[in-house]
Amino acid sequence: MTGLPKRGALSQKGRGKFPASLLRSLALTLALAGVASSAFAEPTLSVAVFGAAAGPRASAAEETRLIAIDQFGYRPGDRKFAVLADPVEGFNRDATYSPSKVLEVRRWKDDTIVFSGQSAAWNAGELQASSGDRGWWFDFSELASEGTYYILDEANNLRSGAFRIGDDVYNAVLNASLRAFFYNRAGFAKKVPFADVRWQDDAAYLGPRQDGEARSAFMPDDASLQRDLRGGWFDAGDTNKYTNSAAYSLHMLLGAYREKPEVWSDTVGIPESGNGIPDILDEIQWELDWLERMQEDDGSVILKVGKITHNGFSPPSLDSEPRYHTGVCSSSTITAASVFAHAALVWRSLQALADRSEILLRHAIDAWRWYQANPKRDDCDNQIVKAGDADLSLETQKSWSVVAAAYLYAATGEAEFGDYFKVNFKETLPFREEGWSRYHSPEGDALLFYAASDTANDEARNEILSRKIDNALGSSELYGGDIASDLYRSFLTDSSYHWGSNRVRLEQGHTNYLMVEFGLSDGNSLREFEERALSAIHYIHGVNPLGIVYLSNMYELGAEHSVNEIYHSWFADGTDFDNALSSKFGPAPGFLVGGPNKDYSGQIAPPAAQPIQKAYRDWNAGWPERSWELTEPSITYQAAYVRLLSKFASTDH
């Protein structure tokens, strides 16, 4: 059997997983193409908190969101920009701002000036339609000394919030976002010391006729169809569990570990911490255990388990309603096959998990065999288990089969899987759309994973690499140095501001970072791809038209303005967990919301009748306000965020 593809010297810019001779022979380096540089815990256990805790601040200037910064901070060597906004359209249009000629960066604890400079008008002072703002960029990249700072516009008596500069500015945030999966565990008690005292709950869905005794939603009186489907993660704002979204999330988390294992500690503060295995893998294992229970003896995999009502309960352990499953489907079987194979490879790389790896591989092969031998359907989900259609189109199932083949071939070396990949790899999204796979990262990841393998077919490898780099060359709005195309330095096409736009932004950041990960260009261009990826993180962290961190209740980790309400049955409207500022507890930290949605179907303004980047509201009301279209979290959003953020985390735990 073969193992993981060899890791390149990724810490050295321009040296990736593919030899320079191969890239030259393909004429694929971006440098030759003339691409120019841009002109311009909770863990209660141990969290480095700054801001007010850093001591008194000498300046009495008023803090404003119109000086938008990454509210957690910046690494010393990265480019650092504040966006200064003058709102013209939208809900905040009366909050006008014209920055002074000179702005200063001051040290938080003693008000010492450490940097001063002028701002530059974005796009010659033009209005950006998507945000409804005009604005300026203030570049303070020269400041690289570690510490806590703020930006001061002295003449206007305005300042930004506090931010840190340091190698580890994202580590506590990364841990909090990983812990969101722990809070989403079904069938597991969240208790001190692993849960914060504010967010404790007993194990949910272990009662009669619940997850341990889930009946068929189609034949609930047939006891022979009862299944033990305990465990797993709540999928989103609801507490149901879906194989297909679990597979996406697991691929993203497995990739986060596989690509940068040194980032992940065993001290995040979940019950498995301290067992000698990185906590991200322990959390993945929790979901894998559930996914194994979803697999039938013949290899097929159940699509969905949950409730047949929309009723929510806070906290979830109070919910005694019965739970049901929807039976097996071709889509859930092939997605499970792909993630079992991927996990088997990762588990094989750790001695303590090697035996478990072989079990996962058997699950993968059994699922693959069933999928190939049985009819392909896309009508398995009639939504009797609420809510949403969890099935996949036949075209998407075909793409997932290529993902499965890539990892099965790496795990087994068997020609069946390699041959299937060679015949079908062009059926995936990277060969059908621009942006490589910004709407489904596991497909693009699997292609490059295969191409980096010593056993890859040369013709297939060359086609994959050609497609990836041609895509980067031909999609300047989505890749690399064209940061200036958006006032807030993280461009999305207008059409991408739909339900879950934050995930699209993160996947676009990820597709840029793949250029760095696999060394598909020269050093200067790689820095531009890396900056484009990091700009997506800055946007999530506050460099956006709302000046808001799109993660829940992050005040104790350094945010000045973060999401206060999320659409989640535990943290629901009117409960003790409703609002981070005005209810008893607020939601648990670190849950990523869906983000701005131009297609919001309710009537509340905002988010209705706003420029598309302002099509957001910090609230969690139910019907008919439909806040779930913007503020609902999802394990898929969460996994995309964890993966991209991990690229910029420090290895010092």
Image (cartoon, rainbow, N blue to C red):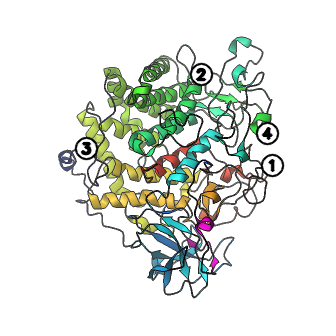
Kind of residue sitting beneath label 4: Phe
Check disc 4 and report the residue beneath it: 313
Check disc 2 and report the residue beneath it: 293
Magenta residue check for 301 = no
Kind of residue sitting beneath label 3: Phe
Check disc 3 and report the residue beneath it: 18
Check disc 1 and report the residue beneath it: 575
Q: Is residue 600 left or right of residue 396?
A: right
The Cα atoms of the two marked residues, 4 and 1, are separated by 10 Å
Name the main secondary structure of what is drawn in magenta: loop
Q: Is residue 117 above or below residue 513?
A: below
Magenta residue check for 59 = yes
Closer-to-camera residue (109/357) = 109
**Element at label 2:** helix
**Mark 4 or mark 3, whichever is nearer to me:** 4
Question: Is residue 478 in view?
Answer: no
The Cα atoms of the two marked residues, 3 and 2, are separated by 39 Å
Closer-to-camera residue (254/637) = 254
Pointer 4 or 2: first along the chain: 2
